[in-house]
Amino acid sequence: MPGDMLQILRPDGTLVGDAPVDVDTTRDLYHAMVVGRVYDRKCTAMQKQGRLATYAPFEGQEACQIGAVAPLEEQDWVVATYRDAAAMWFAGYPMVNLILGRTGDERGGQIPEGVNVLPPSITVGGHMIHAVGTGWASKLQGDGGVSLTMFGDGATSEGDFHEAMNFAGVYQTPTVFFCQNNGWAISLPFEQQTNAAALVDKAIGYGMPGVRIDGNDLFAVVAATTEAVETARSGGGPTFIEAMTYRIGPHTTADDPGRYRTEEATDEWRRSDPIDRVRAYLVANDAWDQSWEDEVADEASDQVEAAVEEAEALDPFTAGEVFDAMFAEPTQTLLDQRDMLRRDG
Amino acid sequence: MNGQATTERTMAQALNAGLREALSDESVVILGEDVGRTGGVFRVTDGLQAEYGAERVVDTPVAESGIVGAAFGLAVAGMRPIAEIQFMGFSYPGYDQVVNHVSRIRNRSRHRFTAPLVIRIPYGGGIGAAEHHSESFEAIYTHVPGLKVVVPSRPIDAKGLLTAAVADPDPVIFLEPIRAYRSMKEEVPDDSYEVPIGVASIERPGDDVTLIGYGAMMREVREAAEVLASSGVGAEVIDLRTLVPLDVETVIASVQNTGRAVIVHEAPRTSGFGGEIAATIQERALYSLRAPVERVTGWDIVVPLRRAEKHYTPGVDRIVAAAMRTTEGH
């Protein structure tokens, strides 16, 4: 991995610095990462079976997604993308809604009141400014809320990245910009995404602190995000975090990475697996055994299967229902069109 | 509104009064370029920052996508933002936010999240402004599902529609005709009132031809009705006031009575909103028509700069000529 970056847990599971959480919490976060992976692999399998629309796997990014959400509280906001299902789930977005969304159903976005997680952004880069807006609202409303936005290296090339970072800097919104630099934007490698040596260098241009971390190191993610969240919550404004990680899988299930990259680099990153690393740490601290591992795996599997079952049990919208959520009340125009659809099929 | 206190105001002043009223709700935030210290390039927000502070009336960096996107986030989190874009010609960087986020969050979350925000956009020509400052591309907003599009033509409607737009649970594109900001004054109630979104106004009854317009073109439409009256042609004048949702019933009832329709807008002709109205008329009132529906519009050209702009904007003569054509031989 290139450049200077914060690392606390080495790939072999030994510590370079202080663990930001205790062993019990580490076990909880490990459990959550396993749930994320089971969910991810299940969705990939379901897509191949034709049960899901296109799916964007996040394998290899579990430390980023669970670790970044770990410091958040109930009043905080998460504004993330189609590749951030584990983060969204860990922030309270029900798994059934995530799966429902990927089956191709708008009710995926109909999450419970009180869960401040927006449905995943599908277009790249337009959503980061929303976390500036929600953070700004928290500031005006005085609720102490922090907004976390997650995005990839590709999104930093969008003009909206600039506008979001600039607004956050100008208004000192409590926004944490968490970039998962996973090396690839579909087929474009990081080296062609930017001429900057590191994305974290961009933070200074917006007058905000930036930190570059090992994104496959759960402890580095938790430590950096905790500091950023505390800074934001105490009125210190936004932080930009560049987490170095790797997209082990394809961009989506419709993508074929064999057209643009070799397996060797991917294999190297597989050896830096974020879940294996935490397991090694737990083993070294006498906080892991096989029966617990099996228990965690079974629970994760049951949880995912239950969500799948619930999502698939829901009937698709009727013809009429597709008109129901354009406005608070359907306009006469929409009611007329609904009648046309019912009349003519 | 009889018996209530009124003040003679231009549209800019009426909007200013409406915004001041809106700010009494603490969830309302006004944001845009130069809206604070200078009161906006058209002075519509004049004095509001001095009264409500820089946290409520916010000068933003020059970034329209940022303005609309931040307003979206504010709205989703329970605020009532009113964003100002300086000119329609500068609104396009924010269009992605409007189309991909603002207009669809309610549907993609099935009512769980909403974006009750107002985007105020001065639009249209007629003041000899610089390039990009005279566009009338309302159709790029009326074409997007999930948006309401409002266009006042006069001070009293501007204030009432603005109040309705701020209270609306859904996003409203609020188009302000630049040419009408100061061209007309009328008595505007001081107290709060709403002009409902989606209801057209029959400004003048008539039995011979229906003139349908909105925004700044209403001035020419009104004058044309006078000219037609002097020729013995009774024109019914409809100010649409809202483009989406369109008040189809008012338009159709009028055309069923007159049998003739002339649609007026300054936007380019092709794919202009007039085409939508004409299509609706033929769907709903074809057998009442006694002549083809006429469209009097801007041309499919870039709005000419100041010295030749008069060739672009429809004038009274073109409206009268179109109306007279509908009456010939019938």
Image (cartoon, rainbow, N blue to C red):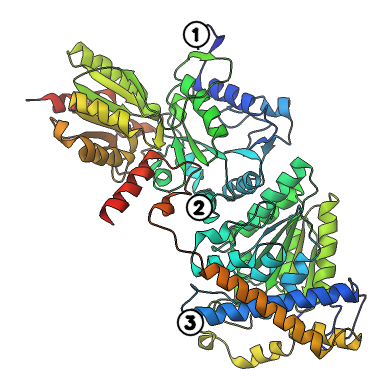
Q: Specify the amino acid type for callout 1.
A: Asn
| Numbered mark located on residue B2 in the image | 1
User: Callout 2: residue from which chain?
Assistant: B
Give the label, 3 or 1, closer to the camera: 3
Q: Is residue B188 above or below residue B132?
A: above
Who is closer to the viewer here, A84 or A257? A84
Image coordinates of residue B77 in percent, x first then y, are 67, 46
Q: How many C-alpha atoms fall within 10 Å of the one at disc 2: few (<14), some, or many (≥20)?
A: many
Q: Which residue is mark 2?
A: B107
Could you tell me how many numbered marks the image carries? 3
User: Callout 3: residue from which chain?
Assistant: A
Q: Which residue is depicted at the point 22% across and 29% down?
A: B261
Q: Secondary structure at mark 3?
A: loop
Q: Are the residues flagged by discs 3 and 1 in contact, CB closer than 8 Å?
A: no
User: Callout 1: residue from which chain?
Assistant: B
Q: Is residue B160 above or below residue B75?
A: above
User: How many angstroms separate mark 2 from mark 1 (CA)?
Assistant: 41 Å
Who is closer to the viewer here, A83 or A31? A31
Image coordinates of residue B233 in percent, x first then y, are 18, 16
Quarter-wise, where is residue B25 in the image?
top right
Q: Are the residues flagged by discs 2 and 1 in contact, CB closer than 8 Å?
A: no
Quarter-wise, where is residue A37 in the image?
bottom right
Image coordinates of residue B274 in percent, x first then y, are 29, 38
| Numbered mark located on residue A49 in the image | 3
